[in-house]
Amino acid sequence: MAREFAKKFYNSKAWRKCRAAFIAKRRAIDGGMCQRCSRDVGYIVHHVKWITPDNINDPAITLNHENLEYVCQTCHSRIEEKDRGYKFDEHGRVIPAG
């Protein structure tokens, strides 16, 4: 779930267009497999360098394919758990890690 400051960005036409183009590119490369595990089909377009309130208006971060990964739900949950200290249950709800 997008953090409050990022909701407008994730609902923007620019992001939807960028996301769709990135998914199409990944599908053409390898059928859209997860770029982390290569076992499951990608599900989430993840920003490698996280979006923050300081960089959300920087298209080199937010709309740059070089800063994106197409990852499965399992890998994305692992990224969130490692980097942010929380994880998701099987329904995608945030739960405390640890």
Image (cartoon, rainbow, N blue to C red):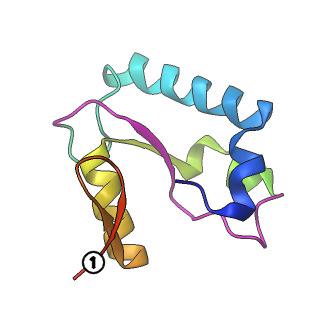
Kindly identify the residue that appears in the image at 22 percent across and 49 percent down: 90
Q: Position of residue 35 (x, y in %)?
A: 32, 42
**Overall secondary structure of the magenta stretch?**
loop
| Residue at numbered disc 1 | 97
- Please tell me whether mark 1 sits on a helix, a strand or a loop: loop
Q: Residue 36: in sight, yes or no?
A: no
Residue reaching furthest to the bottom: 98
Q: Image check: 10 left or right of 81?
A: right
Location of residue 38 with respect to 21 vertically, above or below: below
Q: Image check: 1 left or right of 15?
A: left
Q: Image check: 58 left or right of 28?
A: right
Image quadrant in which you'd find residue 71? top left
Q: Quadrant of the C terminus?
A: bottom left
Residue reaching furthest to the right: 57
Kindly identify the residue that appears in the image at 37 percent across and 35 percent down: 43
Image quadrant in which you'd find residue 14? top right
**Amino acid on which disc 1 is placed:** Ala
Image quadrant in which you'd find residue 27? top left
For this rendering, which residue is in front, 69 or 95?
A: 95
Kindly identify the residue that appears in the image at 28 percent across and 52 percent down: 75
Q: Residue 4: in sight, yes or no?
A: yes
For this rendering, which residue is in front, 96 or 31?
A: 96
Magenta range is 39-57
Location of residue 43 with respect to 20 vertically, above or below: below
Q: Image check: 78 left or right of 21?
A: left
Q: Where is residue 15 in the image (x, y as percent from the top left)?
A: 71, 37
